[in-house]
Amino acid sequence: MYKVQTYNAISDKGLSRFPADSYEVGSELDAADAYILRSHKLHDQEVPSSLVAVARAGAGTNNVPVEDYSAKGIVVFNTPGANANAVKELVLTGILMSCRDIAGGIEFVRNVEGVTDEAEMAKLLEQEKKKFAGSEIKGKTLGVIGLGAIGALVANVATELGMNVVGFDPAISVEAAWRLSRRVEKMESVEALMSRADFITVHVPAIPATKGLINSEKLALCKEGTVLLNFAREQVVDEAAVIAALDSGKLHRFVTDFPTLSLAKRRDVIQMPHIGASTAEAEENCAVMAADQLMDYLENGNIKNSVNFPATSMARNGGSRITVANDNVPAVLGNVLSILADANLNIIDMLNRSRDELAYNIIDVEGDVKEGITSAIGEVEGVTSVRLL
């Protein structure tokens, strides 16, 4: 029986994926094999020795101490693309709200007082609507920084709406490139993109390399009156630089899903309460993907959409399956295989993958694995975790 500890409100559609006869799922479990969570912060939380995997029902994993978990051989999953459509739609909303005072117009109508008939109402609105005039997005240039699951969707829909789209992503995957419209023009740098765009939207992960990616130097390259949108992570934008750019007129609007007190009263800032993925569909998609990835790892040792371990998948070939996580250094795998050879265990099939400083192995052997074999493998220098499936 596998134990899956839940944090936050995880969609029942995802939790129902776990078979009741082989999984115990709940918010208060001892010795959990896996966690599934959304925004709950795991930093400084004691890690049980039983934990082998964590699934974040969402794309960002800054609430998970990934480096510490990697050292313990704990696989951390996310769900890229599961909430992409929800975020795309909100980014589009932000673009439209930034160039037309839609919210202001709605608020004006809501607060009309002293009007007693429809004719008077129509006359008032005709007089006042010029206050809410704006501009169209057709023919304007949108710059998309980061062309992953969300960025590619944003870029594609913008082209369909008649925008010119330029994009930059130094690490774009083949899969993402296939998804991208041929009408998106590739830029050679963030700086080149920012000098071209009327609207700039950021879709990069929060990692050390992207902290403060949008700073005063880059904002100085923008056209006068540019609109900046941040639906990625708060850390990728230097707030002080944004405020200075708004004050100077370099930025016309700043639209963000990560509100702060410093920006709360500004009329040239549109802040949303971190609702990019807050749709029923997105929460269900993320929960289902997270659950399926956890089950495949717990039962078969397969890894898909991990942020710290290499993608590794091998069909079952009979016999017993051993998985080994280790430091990506010479001789570790050789020592593991020597233990299997000394135990007269014949290898049916095997897969070895590495990612930066980590390596992962799936080994199928004939017959049963005797007690003590996995313990011996776990004692090999450089091995961080070993499982018998």
Image: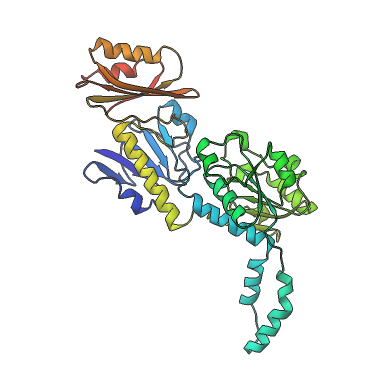
Residue 174 coordinates in the image, percent (x, y): 52, 36
**Residue at x-position 68% and y-position 43%:** 238
Q: In the figure, residue 157 lies in which quadrant?
A: bottom right
Quadrant, the N terminus: top left
358 over 79 or under it: above or below: above
**Residue at x-position 68% and y-position 47%:** 239
Q: In the figure, residue 195 lies in which quadrant?
A: top right
Give the total of numbered labels.
0
Depth order, front residue of 78/92: 92
242 over 383 or under it: above or below: below
Any part of residue 274 in sight: no
Any part of residue 353 in sight: yes
Quadrant, the C terminus: top left
Lateral position of residue 13 relative to residue 81, left or right: left
Lateral position of residue 253 relative to residue 63, left or right: right
Residue 177 coordinates in the image, percent (x, y): 55, 40
Depth order, front residue of 343/182: 182
**Residue at x-position 72% and y-position 39%:** 191
Depth order, front residue of 158/64: 158
Depth order, front residue of 39/187: 187
Residue furthest out toward the front: 182
Lateral position of residue 12 relative to residue 180, left or right: left
253 over 77 or under it: above or below: below
103 over 349 or under it: above or below: below
Residue 334 coordinates in the image, percent (x, y): 37, 12
